[in-house]
Amino acid sequence: MKLLLAENDTSLSEDLSVFLTKAGFEVEHVDNIIQAEKKLCNSSYDIALLALDTPSDCINIITQLRTAQRTLPIILMATTKQSKDCIAGLSAGADDCLTKPFAFDEMLVRIQALLRRCLHNKATVRPHHLQLDWQKQLAWIGNVAIKLSSRELAILSILLTKPGDTVTKQHIAEQLRDKHHVDLGDNAVEVYIHRLRKKVEPSGINIRTIWRLGYLVCSK
């Protein structure tokens, strides 16, 4: 899973990066909240750890993400003197707040618990009449099961995370590599999209090709 770490303490950020990498995360580190904002706007992450070094900027970013309906899990890291800022961050939409200094093991447990809750909340995606059940690895049209391979299911889930928006082949390939550990080229993505079209059309969903841009999921 991909994790964004925003922390300006060099020693702490290095130790956290090593610890989280060993725990199985792909860590990207930035040393200020402005760089974090750019990363969050241009890249996709599974969770973010943000230090409250500049509280107003941090809280503004959280507010923007939540206003844009971004459900990215966010954990704040604050000093004991920043309790009011931590409360403000939680009120703005952060999911948790750790007080420095904290035990890395406790931090990892909190990250895992938060990710489990988010995974449970997103376990079933239900646009229109189509349902994706990740626990059972099935897609359904009403009460009829749709037979999809694991790669087809993964690609369909990526498309459905942005209903009404064009999804590029590059984004699909990046998400497959980062979240599903699958490496596909453009031609392979096109083949799977072609297969998916035939299988999901009965649900009233159309996967349109937007020339030179990507794919758009919409109602027929």
Image (cartoon, grey):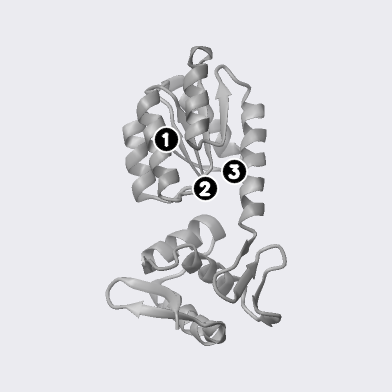
Residue designated by label 3: 24
Marking on residue 29: 1
Up-down relation of residue 2 to residue 195 (above or below): above
Residues packed near mark 2 inside 10 Å, few (<14), some (14 to 19) or many (20 plus): some
x and y percentages locating residue 202 in the rendered image: 56, 87
Residue 143 or residue 152, whichever sits in front: 143
**Residue at 52% from the left image edge and 47% from the top image edge:** 46
Residue designated by label 2: 46
Residue 89 or residue 148, whichever sits in front: 89
Residue kind at label 3, given as amino acid type: Gly
Q: Secondary structure at mark 2?
A: loop
Horizontally, residue 39 falls left or right of residue 191, namely left
Residue 172 image-quadrant placement: bottom left
Q: Counting residues from the N terminus, which is met first, the one under dot 3 or under dot 1? A: 3
Up-down relation of residue 19 to residue 42 (above or below): above
Residue kind at label 1, given as amino acid type: His
Residue 79 or residue 195, whichever sits in front: 79
Front disc: 2 or 3: 2
Residue kind at label 2, given as amino acid type: Asp
Q: What distance separates the C-alpha of mark 2 from that of mark 3?
A: 13 Å
Horizontally, residue 105 falls left or right of residue 12, namely right
Q: Secondary structure at mark 1?
A: strand
Image quarter hosting the C terminus: bottom left
Residue 141 or residue 152, whichever sits in front: 141
Front disc: 2 or 1: 2
Q: Counting residues from the N terminus, which is met first, the one under dot 2 or under dot 3? A: 3
